[in-house]
Image (spheres, rainbow, N blue to C red):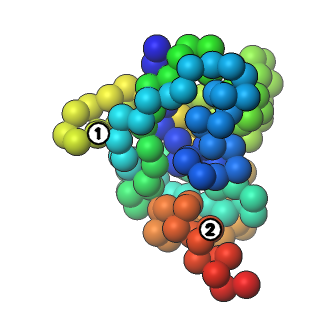
Amino acid sequence: MQNVFVYGTLRAGQVNDISAAAARHDIAAPTLLGTASVRGRLFDFGLYPGLVVDAAGVAVKGDVYEIDDRLVAVLDEIEAVYPGVEGLFRAHQMTVHVDGTAIQCLAYPVAEHAVQGLPEIASGDWVEHRRANHAAR
């Protein structure tokens, strides 16, 4: 078992909902440990967000799950993270705090150079941003 911090399409109710991804692959359901945030900048790629970790950034909201180790390969595929391939997303270990407890987590930030010219999500919350944009249409 390990922990993962999800901030975008892997969040509950989103297109790549982590629990639905586990179910599709007959892997035990992830256990939600709580909500957390990391300092960074969140960018809108259109159909998904990208996080650039930055201590001077805003609080980027996400959820922390305890997951079966087999789910990591599924998440890597969703995020197109492959050994030896330099892609948009990168598997990264980071520490987040859930209810005051420090938890080591896997996360998938993007390369900083990839966000050039993209709109920044000032709230740091992808789900809120998507709701607001959908309502505006």
One can see residue 93 in this view: no
Q: Secondary structure at mark 2?
A: helix
What residue type is disc 1 on?
Answer: His
One can see residue 137 in this view: yes
User: Among all residues in the image, which is located at the extreme bottom?
Assistant: 136
Left or right: 79, with 107 as reference point: right
Query: In the picture shown, does residue 123 fall above or below 11?
Result: below
Query: In the picture shown, does residue 40 fall above or below 17?
Result: below
> In percent of the image, x 36 and y 35: which residue is there?
33
> In percent of the image, x 65 and y 77: which residue is there?
133
| Residue situated in front as seen by the camera: 124 or 133 | 133
> In percent of the image, x 52 and y 68: which residue is there?
128
| Residue situated in front as seen by the camera: 64 or 13 | 13
Residue 82 location, x and y as percent?
76, 22
* Residue at which label 1 appears: 97
- The part of the image, by quadrant, that contains residue 31 is top left
Chain-order first, disc 2 or disc 1: 1
Query: In the picture shown, does residue 116 fall above or below 90?
Result: below
Query: In the picture shown, does residue 85 fall above or below 49?
Result: above
- Give the label on residue 130, or none: 2
Mark 1 crowdedness (10 Å alpha carbons): few <14, some 14-19, many ≥20: some
Left or right: 52, with 39 as reference point: right
What residue type is disc 2 on?
Answer: Arg
Left or right: 102, with 32 as reference point: left
Mark 2 to mark 1: distance in Å?
25 Å
Residue 34 location, x and y as percent?
35, 41
Residue 3 location, x and y as percent?
44, 25
> In percent of the image, x 66 and y 28: which residue is there?
23
Quarter of the C terminus within the rendering: bottom right
Residue 112 location, x and y as percent?
63, 48
User: Among all residues in the image, which is located at the extreme right?
Assistant: 85
Q: Secondary structure at mark 1?
A: strand
